[in-house]
Amino acid sequence: MPAQELAGHGGPVRALAVLPGEGASGGLASSGFDQAVILWDPAQAGARRVMRWHGGAVNALAALPDGGLASAGEDGRIALWPPGGAEQPRQVLEGHAAPVAALAVGPGGELASAGWDGTVRRWRPDGTAAVLEGHRGPVNGLAFLPAGLASAGYDGSLRLWAADGSGRVIGEFGVPQNALAALPQGEAFGGLAAAGADGMVRLLGPDGTVRVLPVGPRPVVALAVAPPRAGHGGLLAAASLGGSVSLLALPEGRLVTRLEGPGLPVWAVAFAADGQSLWTGGQDRVVRRWSLAGQPLGPLQPAVPAAAAGGEDAWAFRACVACHALRAEAGPMAGPHLQGLFGRRMGSVPGYPYSERLARGDITWTRETVAELFTRGPDVVTPGTRMPVQRLENPAEMAALLHFLEEATR
């Protein structure tokens, strides 16, 4: 059975966050290099909302205690979104002078961020922040511990920051560290997992002991921890640029299984709310869901209606179906329905909340204008749009998409 796949991003998927209150497996948010944040309904394999506000790749996501979401990225800004998303963030936090690489939320709801400006910031409710300095270069990982806030940097060090802003080095590994995860607290266990550019995961115990777990020859770039369950002390997922995700049993670090995807870098991992499955996202622009036994879960992806005309070319619509329905009666999705697309003026579907640029309605959709949209990219043809950035460079895929749309949207 193929993995459940959510295809909707126009570029590599960079971050994932599981949202509470959405059933046993939880709701899901993803973000990527296409500047978009997508809120998914996993049960329906569809997108609820696409939020395109950041001015660059969105590198980090964090679920907030009230059901909202924090996002941050290349533009150095942190956006706080209400539950269910919105057209604009409810609050914007600014201060980083370079891309933000990591976000973390503490037990009391405190938000922390880490950036390539070498700083860690602990944000107060009024939007100001305590700036923590000490790393020599970009800071890539954050995790809250009972003893304070831990950070991991390109300088190879792990630091622990107390509530008063003081910090100390708790690990020096000599190679860049790309991500951090807090380990479950238990008998003689706890501490941190750090992802190294040398393909190693290092488990740092509360007593300072370090265990080194070889994951593979390529850098480890993302970590996630599943809580302890009957029979084991938890699971650690470690994703690599080699395209695999290793599931390691805790506390011993034994390899349970390795998830093998399409062989492209995996940038993000997140366990579902019930701890029974794992979400991954990476270079191929797709979000996948796996069982903890290493078996992919179905169905394949949001299905293109089999009865639609031009069925043999439906494969070219596989990314669009996450946000667009083919028929008006299908109900609201992240994007407007496409019924009657060709000959329709841009921004003219009644009731759909278009971005300011699309609402101008100065383009009529034809084969030529749709081709231009996906050749030059939505960010160039319709600057300011919230549509995820996607470009089609394969002439056969472009021809198939145009034929499918021409037949299926009549």
Image: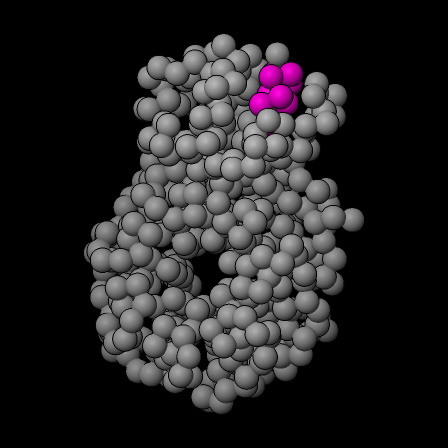
Q: How many marks?
A: 0
Magenta extent: 401-409
Residue located at (72% from left, 27% from top) = 312
Q: In screen coordinates, is 270 left or right of 171?
A: right
Q: In screen coordinates, is 155 left or right of 181?
A: left
Residue 282, relative to residue 254: is it above or below? Answer: above
User: Looking at the rendering, which quadrant does residue 346 occupy?
Assistant: top left
Residue located at (35% from left, 15% from top) = 362
Residue 382, relative to residue 166: is it above or below? Answer: above
Tell me the chief SS of the magenta region. Answer: helix
In the rendered image, residue 239, in percent from the top left (x then y), is placed at 56, 65
Q: In screen coordinates, is 73 left or right of 292?
A: left
Residue reaching furthest top?
A: 343
Quarter of the image for the C terminus: give it: top right
User: Looking at the rendering, which quadrant does residue 328 occupy?
Assistant: top right
In the rendered image, residue 7, in percent from the top left (x then y), is placed at 58, 41
Residue located at (57% from left, 15% from top) = 339
In the rendered image, residue 114, in percent from the top left (x then y), is placed at 33, 63
User: Looking at the rendering, which quadrant does residue 212 occupy?
Assistant: bottom right
Residue 259, relative to residue 333: is it above or below? Answer: below
In the rendered image, residue 233, in percent from the top left (x then y), is placed at 64, 75
Q: Is 407 a magenta residue?
A: yes
